[in-house]
Amino acid sequence: MNLAELEQRALELVRQADFGPEAVRVNAEIVKSAPTRESAWTRLGRCHLEQRQFDEAVEALRAALALNPSNAIATRLLSEVRRQRALTPTAKERATTGFSTREFAMLESLSPDEAARALRPRIEALFDTINQTAIAARIVDARH
């Protein structure tokens, strides 16, 4: 495929909200052929974000922003990468506290209402787990 065909295919994939392996391949080919193509770098960053390939997403979005520091889409996507990465704890962090250092840092930046909303599913899951154990009856007895 030539560059125009690749660009057309990349745009078709965006319209289909397809940010999978083919979209990565097409946009990677575009930036390899035309490294100053800001839109391809932005799309490539989005593809990597959707696939939770955070390091690759940051690299692509920084390349887009190096070409155009005013690229609002790349800026928003980079913020989203950082937010999602912060909420993705490592296996070791999850095993020790259930929360990662990044998650605690993210919680510090939220208002109390936003933090409560962010924590609600995990707190409810904790209560559901406790309620399914033998300790639940002992907790109720202790409260009475």
Image (cartoon, rainbow, N blue to C red):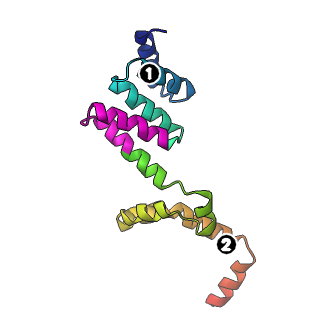
Q: Residues within 10 Å of mark 1 (few under 14, many from 20)?
A: few
Instruction: Let me know if residue 56 is in the magenta part.
Output: yes
Q: Is residue 107 above or below residue 26?
A: below
Judge from the rendering whether residue 50 lies leftward or rightward of residue 62; answer left or right: right
Asked whether 128 or 109 is in front, the reply is 109
The type of residue carrying mark 1 is Lys
The picture places residue 143, in percent across and down from the top left corner, at 61, 88
C-alpha gap between disc 2 and disc 1: 53 Å
Q: Horizontal and vertical percent for residue 10? A: 45, 20
Q: Dot 2: what SS?
A: helix
Identify the residue at horizontal 30%, vertical 35% (top origin): 66
Query: Residue farthest to the left?
Result: 70
- Residue 55: x and y in percent read 48, 43
Q: Which residue is mark 2?
A: 130
Q: Which residues are magenta?
A: 55-78
| Pointer 1 residue | 32
What kind of residue is marked 2? Ile
At x 34% / y 22%, what residue is drawn? 37
Looking at the rendered image, the quarter that the C terminus falls into is bottom right
> Was residue 65 drawn as part of the magenta stretch in this picture?
yes
- Which quadrant of the figure has residue 124? bottom right
Q: Which mark is residue 75?
A: none
